[in-house]
Image (cartoon, rainbow, N blue to C red):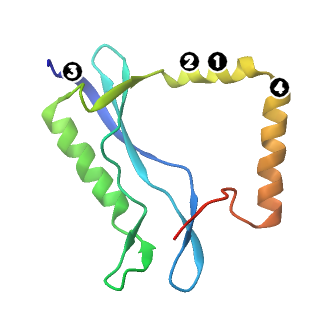
Amino acid sequence: MKRIPIASCSAVEGPLYAVEFEDSVGTCYDWSFEARSVDGRRYALRTYRVEGCVRNEEGCLQANYRARDQAARFVERVEARESIDPALWDEVPDRDALRELMDSWGAEEARREKEDDLHWEASGRPAYGSVRR
């Protein structure tokens, strides 16, 4: 299969999620990856991500303090190749197209989502129901 020439690659911070550490609950986020082809198409890597939390020697979860550096090194490797394998990357809509789609949902949906976000922020609890254990 023919590789896709790229103009750039970037690491993207994912949404925060709650994590039950050894003695507390905290938040982390994973890093995913996007590439922009030379013809302007956007691709997302589906086969790899950098985890925001890892297990230590005792098997307890802890924050992955090297995640940002790991993501940056991966981006450098992809950009050095100057192309991506279409078997590993999916073409995704451009962010502007996604914004237009979200705008078409209407103001009422946006208002409800903002209300939910404010509720979770005011309660001091993570906005996500699942906690990684």
The reply to whether the C-beta atoms of the residues labelled 1 and 4 are less than 8 Å apart is no
Q: Amino acid at mark 4?
A: Ala
With 121 as the anchor, is 61 left or right in this view?
A: left
| Mark 1 vs 3, N-terminal side | 3
| Mark 1 vs 4, N-terminal side | 1
Q: Is residue 73 above or below residue 19?
A: above
* Cα–Cα gap, marks 1 and 4: 12 Å
Q: Amino acid at mark 3?
A: Ile
Number of callouts in the render?
A: 4
Give the structural element (helix, strand or loop) at label 2. helix
* Residue 76 image-quadrant placement: top left
Residue 11, horizontal then vertical, whole percent: 37, 44
* Cα–Cα gap, marks 2 and 3: 22 Å
State the residue position of label 1: 100
Q: Amino acid at mark 2?
A: Ala
State the residue position of label 2: 97
The reply to whether the C-beta atoms of the residues labelled 2 and 1 are less than 8 Å apart is yes
Give the structural element (helix, strand or loop) at label 1. helix
Labelled disc at residue 107: 4
At 56% across and 18% down in the image, what residue appears? 97
* Cα–Cα gap, marks 1 and 3: 27 Å
* Cα–Cα gap, marks 2 and 1: 5 Å
Q: Is residue 66 above or below residue 14?
A: below
Q: Is residue 68 above or below residue 58?
A: above
Q: Amino acid at mark 1?
A: Glu
At 30% across and 59% down in the image, what residue appears? 69
* Cα–Cα gap, marks 2 and 4: 17 Å
| Mark 2 vs 3, N-terminal side | 3
Q: Residues within 10 Å of mark 3 (few under 14, many from 20)?
A: some
State the residue position of label 3: 4
Q: Residues within 10 Å of mark 1 (few under 14, many from 20)?
A: few
